[in-house]
Image (cartoon, helix red, strand yellow):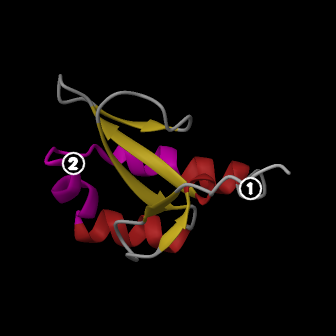
Amino acid sequence: MVKQRKTPERKCIVTNEMKPKKDLIRVVRNKEGEVFVDPTGKKNGRGAYVSRDLDVITKAEKSNALNRQLNAEVDPSIYEELRMLVAGNGNEK
């Protein structure tokens, strides 16, 4: 009998909902203090997860949730990249 593996879940920093990791986008701050989007979810560094939802990304930008979570200044281009990911890959899960 094959044991069903548990789906890894993470919490969205904006909505505080637990969701399957694949439904979230990871944003990482590495040791050098660089902040970037990590579509693979495997890069080293402090990670924060945001739902694949344009409204949630807009809220994160307005409330500076990523800045607080990652303890770093998040460039507006990061939010643009998140929006592109959601818009371009909304149905790719």
Residue that appears at 48% across and 32% down = 42
- Residue 49 lies, in percent from the top left, at 41, 55
- Residue 19 lies, in percent from the top left, at 54, 67
For disc 2, the neighbor class at 10 Å (few under 14, some 14 to 19, many from 20) is some
Residue that appears at 45% across and 76% down = 17
Q: Which residue is mark 1?
A: 4
- Residue 73 lies, in percent from the top left, at 17, 45
Q: Nearer the viewer, residue 16 or 53?
A: 16
Q: Main secondary structure of the magenta part?
A: helix
- Secondary structure of the residue carrying tag 2 is helix
Q: Which of the 4 image quarters holds residue 75? A: top left
Q: Which residue is mark 2?
A: 70
Callouts 2 and 1 close, C-beta under 8 Å:
no
Q: Residue furthest top?
A: 32
Q: Which residues are magenta?
A: 64-82
- Secondary structure of the residue carrying tag 1 is loop
**Left or right relative to 38: residue 4:** right
Q: Is 69 in the magenta?
A: yes
Residue that appears at 27% across and 56% down = 66
| Numbered-mark total | 2
Reading the chain from its start, which is encountered first: label 2 or label 1?
1
For disc 1, the neighbor class at 10 Å (few under 14, some 14 to 19, many from 20) is few
Residue that appears at 51% across and 51% down = 25
Q: Is 70 in the magenta?
A: yes
Q: Which of the 4 image quarters holds residue 43? A: top left
Q: Amino acid at mark 1?
A: Gln
Comparing marks 2 and 1, which lies closer to the viewer? Answer: 1
Q: Amino acid at mark 2?
A: Leu
The alpha-carbon separation of the residues under discs 2 and 1 comes to 33 Å
Q: Nearer the viewer, residue 61 or 46?
A: 46
